[in-house]
Image (cartoon, grey):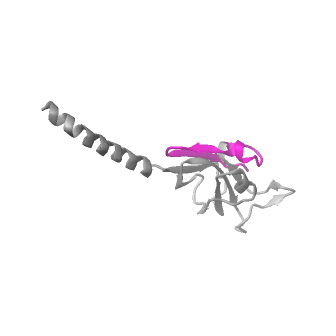
Amino acid sequence: MKSLIFKLLPHVSIIILLTSSVVINSNNKCNLTIKITDISAIKGDIYIAIYDNQNAFDNKNAINSKRLMVTSTKEEYTLSLPIGEYAVILYQDLNKNKKLDRLFSVPLEPYGISNNVNGFPSFDIAKFTLKKNKTIIINIKK
């Protein structure tokens, strides 16, 4: 019996190794859920932009973007992304002109940034790490 176990052990080890590598490869992506709170006006659309580096963040070259119609004081968006670092910027387009209205660079429409930072920070301040399924909450600033 012991000799049979020792004969099968290398084969079992290979099967375990192959199975674990399949699991690792299938987990290269994670779900990110963005919960948007403090929406005061139930109108317009929310535009969400997701960035994966400082250059893209600075040049507004989002790797993923989404438009949500506002139907509640809370909205939610879930997507699948590779493991990595990301920052999210969103705004509520109240007048549906497809841009964040500003006066001398001060937002006139509600907006939000990952980590709920104020103003428009650098990627490093707004970024978060995605290495497993994650939910972030962004509070809309008026």
Residue 67 versus residue 22: which sits nearer the camera? 22
Residue at coordinates 34% horizontally, 47% vertically from top-left?
A: 18
List x then y, in percent, for residue 65: 62, 61
Estimate the x, y position of residue 46 in percent, counting from the top left: 64, 60
Query: Residue 58's x, y, as percent?
Result: 75, 55
Is there any visible trace of residue 124 in the rendered image?
Answer: yes
Q: Nearer the viewer, residue 91 or 32?
A: 32
Quadrant location of the N terminus in the rendered image: top left
Closer to the camera in the image, 62 or 47: 62
Q: Residue furthest right?
A: 104
Highlighted range, magenta: 116-142
Left or right, 80 with reference to 90? left
Q: How many marks?
A: 0
- Residue 1 sits above or below residue 57 on the image: above
Whether residue 93 is in magenta: the answer is: no
Q: Residue at x 50, y 44 (%)?
A: 132
Where residue 125 appears, x then y in whole percent? 71, 42
